[in-house]
Amino acid sequence: MKLKILKLITLYLVLFSCNGNNTNSNLGNQLYNALIDYQEKNPIPAKENTSKTFFLISKNLIYIYEVTFYKDGSVYITLNPSGVSFEKKSYGIYKNHKLKATYIIDDDKIGQNFVKKYLNKDLDKYTLSKAPMIDVTYPTYIYKIKGEKLVFYDSIRGNVRR
């Protein structure tokens, strides 16, 4: 009897700890985990590093993580130093204690199985009035939608050296 109770408590703790990181993100677990993985491998550079490394005025940059859903079932995740693009339907801002500021481009809501709620808040805080010419590209991770799953497919290397 005690062993059964101990197993139930352990199972509860494991399930609780797995779901605890995605609290209030409004993203499904698969997309959230893919974003956390990308963000850990591609952190936003410190301002002092951008001013020394790039031929850009760092005060004119707004770093934000970008997720784009395409009609062919591919999903691209990248880091964008020029802020939110309003050329397409943009949703966000998604962030919590672990997830850094992220927005989603999804014209046809293809990602509805991976996004719990399409937000439209604080996008203006991450928008540049005049986007600078930027020759910096960050790695892009490509995923494919396979039914209800998000499957890593490939990555495209950026031109930023770490």
Image: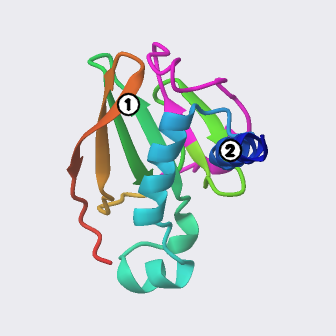
What residue does disc 1 label?
150
**Position above or below: 1 against 150:** below
Residue under the point 39% across and 44% down: 77
Q: Closer to us: mark 1 or mark 2?
A: 2
**Residue type beneath disc 1:** Leu
**Position above or below: 5 against 112:** below
> Image quadrant of residue 24?
top right
**Residue type beneath disc 2:** Lys
Query: Who comes first in sequence, dot 1 or dot 2?
Result: 2
**Position above or below: 41 against 51:** above
Does the image show residue 145?
Answer: yes
User: Considering depth in this image, is 22 or 58 the residue closer to the camera?
Assistant: 22
Residue under the point 51% across and 53% down: 36
What residue does disc 2 label?
7
Region of the chain picked out in magenta, as a range: 103-131
- Magenta-drawn stretch contains 62: no
User: Considering depth in this image, is 136 or 103 the residue closer to the camera?
Assistant: 103
Residue under the point 75% across and 45% down: 9
Residue sitting farthest toward the top: 108
x%, y% of residue 112? 53, 17
- The local secondary structure at tag 1 comes to strand
Instruction: State the quadrant of the C terminus.
Output: bottom left
Left or right: residue 23 compared with residue 92: right
- The local secondary structure at tag 2 comes to helix
- How many numbered badges does the structure rendering display? 2
> Image quadrant of residue 34?
top left
Give the image's coloring scheme. rainbow
x%, y% of residue 88? 47, 26
- Please rate how many residues cluster around mark 2, counting C-alpha atoms within 10 Å: few if below 14, some from 14 to 19, many from 20: few
Residue under the point 53% across and 85% down: 48
- Magenta-drawn stretch contains 118: yes
Does the image show residue 85?
Answer: no
